[in-house]
Image (cartoon, grey):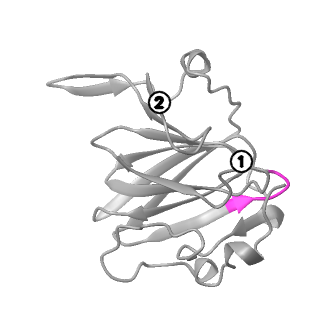
Amino acid sequence: MNVIETSLPGVLILEPKVFGDARGFFLESWNKQTFAKCGLEADFVQDNHSRSARGVLRGLHYQVNEPQGKLVRVVSGSVFDVAVDLRKSSPHFGQWVGYELSAENQRMMWIPPGFAHGFLVLSDSADFLYKTTTYYAPQWDRGIRWDDPQIGVAWPLEGTPVLSAKDRVQPLLKDAEVYA
């Protein structure tokens, strides 16, 4: 496993060993021992799978009181995946990182608790898988506007993104409930 540190401490890009031949490929998407050796010790409780069309932007989402760590990957297509530090005590509060994750590059991203997460679909469609360290808790579900100028995510957009009704009305960071 190749681990790439990002400019946000704790957010990691993970490149698994891929064993391929004429038949296809094999990779371990999760192995508790391997990940622990890389410094990522997480107990996952839920797996999620979403499929989205080109131009769909999901996020920026997080949970207060029951924050989730997320291990995310793409198994079909490609996305621009983003993490935003929402810990007021962090010197990186309000900063973001973004990377392309795709079926082709097989990269994964670890987003620890305390961060908002979102992604933009770059391909015709994308199947996005993620493991979480806590269960989905709708009462603690929160979000921040995808285009908040204070954060300034440089989404690689072609036109206007396709947003859910919920994501169209998310608050700006300055008005959002965040972590201590």
Give the image quarter of residue 4.
Answer: top left
Number of residues whose C-alpha sits closer than 10 Å to that of mark 2, classed few (under 14), some (14–19) or many (20 or more): some
Give above or below for 99 relative to 144.
above
What residue is at 58 percent from the left and 76 percent from the top?
148
The amino acid type, in three-letter code, at marker 2 is Ser
Measured as percent of width and height from the top left, residue 45 is found at: 71, 38
Locate residue 128 relative to residue 33 in the image: left or right.
left
Locate residue 7 relative to residue 79 in the image: left or right.
right
The amino acid type, in three-letter code, at marker 1 is Gln
Q: CA distance from mark 2 to mark 1?
A: 19 Å
Mark 2 vs mark 1: which is more N-terminal? 2
Give above or below for 87 relative to 44.
below
Measured as percent of width and height from the top left, residue 94 is found at: 64, 61
Give the image quarter of residue 39.
Answer: top right
Measured as percent of width and height from the top left, residue 42 is found at: 68, 30
Q: Mark 1 highlights which residue?
A: 68
Q: Which residues are magenta?
A: 62-66
Residue with the most extreme left position? 22
Magenta-drawn stretch contains 97: no
What residue is at 76 percent from the left and 77 percent from the top?
175
Quadrant including the N terminus: top left
Locate residue 111 relative to residue 138 in the image: left or right.
left
Q: Which mark is residue 29?
A: 2
Q: Nearer the viewer, residue 142 or 172?
A: 172
Q: Nearer the viewer, residue 46 or 161?
A: 161
Q: Secondary structure at mark 1?
A: loop
Locate residue 107 relative to residue 95 in the image: left or right.
left
Quadrant including the C terminus: bottom right
Q: From the viewer's perspective, is the residue at label 2 or at label 1 nearer? A: 1
Q: Main secondary structure of the magenta part?
A: loop
Give the image quarter of residue 165.
Answer: bottom right
